[in-house]
Image: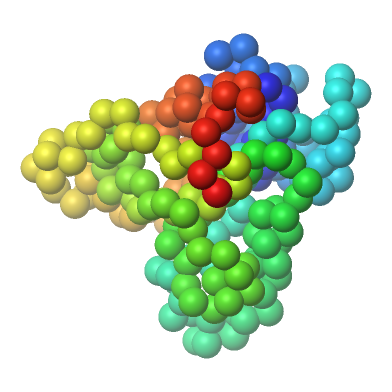
Amino acid sequence: MRVLVACEESQEVCKAFRKLGHNAFSCDIQDCSGGHQEWHIKGDVFDYIDLNPFNEFKGWDLMIAHPPCTRLCNSGVMWLDKRNLWKDMKKGAIFFKKLLNVNIPLIAIENPIPHKYALKIIKKKYNQIIQPYMFGHPERKATCLWLKGLPKLKQTKNVEEEMLKLPKSKSQRIHYTSPGKERGKIRSKTFKGIAIAMAKQWGINENQTKRTS
């Protein structure tokens, strides 16, 4: 499959699809940190929806996107008024909605649980909420998936019981990440178990995909 992983600098999802033989590329306005610059498109994702920069093919079969969530997530809604961030929120929500409506047959967009103001602009509720502990990571981080033409992601290894025995500093490691310039990258990185599940469950011939949305 021809796979575009939008707004991804870590290349975690891209590498999972590449490992299974798919023609996958990450795309972000930042340089990648995943170690494979040859699979990375640096630039605005909307410039590469119809044609990738390597001229290998035109169009994509599947897009998995990780748009910036800082102004859209419910956990940060309190700052919209306190810091007058409504303009930034609207810009982020419009970007999200634009990704959701690109002309690609199969789409998955992931983000934390959004607040009502973002959903009012996006105009589509998420299809599914997943947790890292459903995919072998004893951690908690609720992640929503908006799906087009794809089935819901099935859990692969539920370790919730193991997670519940851990202190919050470990089970909610992402939440307790120390402030710093790398904090955003660490918090936004896709868990490896989730990336592998996406590649194995969605990385098949689109005619074989059981579409549910």
Q: Is residue 190 above or below residue 95?
A: above
Q: In this view, does 213 lie to the left or right of 206?
A: left
Question: Residue 8 at x, y = what percent?
Answer: 62, 39
- Coordinates of residue 56 in the picture (x, y in percent): 86, 20
Q: How many labels does the image show?
A: 0
Counting from the top left corner in percent of width and height, residue 64 is at 61, 40
The structure residue drawn at horizontal position 67% and vertical position 34%, both measured from the top left corner, is: 62
Is 120 on the left or on the right of 159, as rendered? right
Q: Coloring scheme of the render? A: rainbow
Which quarter of the figure has residue 75? bottom left
Q: Residue 182: in sight, yes or no?
A: no
Furthest residue to the right?
A: 55
Please, is residue 155 above or below residue 126 in the view? above
Q: Picture quarter containing residue 7?
A: top right
- Judge left or right: residue 58 versus residue 189: right
Where does the image place residue 92, in percent across and percent down from the top left? 65, 66
Residue drawn at (43%, 62%) of the image: 113
Observer-nearest residue: 4 or 103?
Answer: 103
Q: In which quarter of the image is the N terminus?
A: top right
Residue at 47% x, 73% y: name it: 115
Closer to the camera, 201 or 177? 201
Q: Can residue 193 be seen in this view?
A: yes
Depth order, front residue of 22/105: 105
In the image, 53 versus 36, the foreground residue is 53
- Please state if 172 lies on the left or on the right of 191 as rendered: left
Residue placed at 29% from the left, 38% from the top?
134
